Amino acid sequence: MGHGADLDKIKREYGISGPIIDFSSNINPTMPDGLEEIILENIDYIRAYPDIEYMDLRRSIGSHVAGMGPENVCVGNGATELIFLFMKLVRGSLAIIGPTFSEYARAAQICGLDYRSINMVVNDGAFELPDLDVLDRIENLEAIVVCNPNNPDGGLKSLDRLVDYCQSRSVKLLVDETFIEFCQDYKAYTALNYNCKEVFVLRAMTKFYGMPGLRMGYIISENKDFIDKLYSIKEPWTVNFLAEKITIEVLKSEEESKYRFGIDTRLAYKDERDYLLASLAKIKGMRTYKTDSAFILVEIDKGCGHTAGSLKDVLVRDHSILIRDASDFWGLDSSFIRLAIKDRGSNEALIEALLSIFGKENL
């Protein structure tokens, strides 16, 4: 499975006693203010079951995120539960546009689906959606999964053609937007802009809000009937009361003009993204791909003496820096790594380590 590493396990394997700078996990290092107060104010709710239908939570998400009602929202234990629920309702064939997050294919396999991986094309240093004619070759195509911005490359894509394709053929489109809020122009690219019942937008509180332990995800769609079907097969009470209350309060705060968590986070990521891209461009044997999000896909020159695996090993062993070996993404090979964007001090440490391994580009 393609996830961030277990740092405790890495420390044991390499005999590291001190801290590791983790570039393998794409989590915002900051969290919204006031979380302790929210927890303390609602602590008595721990003695009761959450609302099995989560109406207040769904109403809050629908209103603040999409201007829709609670009937348009399904909540779950992180985005992963919702990916699996979606797959359980697919009866025909599935297309996964990649290279991308491995959990889509894993869920499809577990649910016994006939699925195909359709690779994007690379054009001028950017991953782009493939020619959609290839989708017509898939018999009984019922659903398509696309990640936007995509993991592992981080680039935002216009989905206009893909949405038109799905609408014209009544094909469901699951759009994973769990990283979209890191992007400066995310409101122009979100699939929530499409008035289309075939579109299902997946988001979570995990990445952007820096709360992976909260386990809070949601799907939004104009298709109320499909949302009802998701609930009909969903296990009860998979979202705990803390996740419910924190999500409601954080989303409410985001609507207040004085609250700048989202704005400040996007500005900080833009600055560090620009710094890392400019710095990586000066390193011999490394090629970066267009990104708008919280991570950067890097291709290592095959003649430089390192693979993704060997570079990961050297960085951990000699520099206590952990990167993501991206060779297990379908369609990529041992030349690819993924780097999370972190604070300036951590980013500088990474660049210094890479320069000591590769040297500077000969200009």
Image (tube, rainbow, N blue to C red):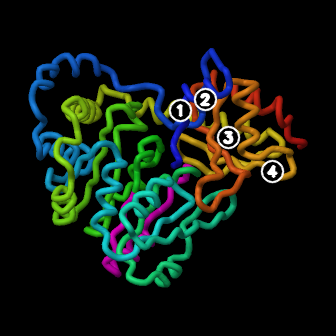
Badge 3 is on which residue?
Answer: 277
Q: For the point 45% across and 57% down, which residue is it? A: 106
Judge whether residue 156 is colored magenta. Answer: yes
> Residues at badges 2 and 3 in contact (C-beta under 8 Å)?
no
Q: Residues within 10 Å of mark 1 (few under 14, many from 20)?
A: few
Q: Is residue 104 left or right of residue 204?
A: right
Q: Regarding mark 1 in the picture, which secondary structure is present there?
A: loop
Q: Regarding mark 4 in the picture, which secondary structure is present there?
A: loop
Q: Amino acid at mark 2?
A: Ile
Q: Amino acid at mark 4?
A: Asp
Q: Regarding mark 3 in the picture, which secondary structure is present there?
A: helix
Q: Amino acid at mark 1?
A: Asp
Residue 317 falls in image quadrant: top right
Residue 251, image x, y percentages: 26, 36
User: The magenta stretch spans which residues?
Assistant: 154-175
Alpha carbons under labels 2 and 3: distance apart: 27 Å
Badge 2 is on which residue?
Answer: 10
> Residues at badges 2 and 1 in contact (C-beta under 8 Å)?
yes
Depth check, mark 3 against mark 1: the one in front is 1
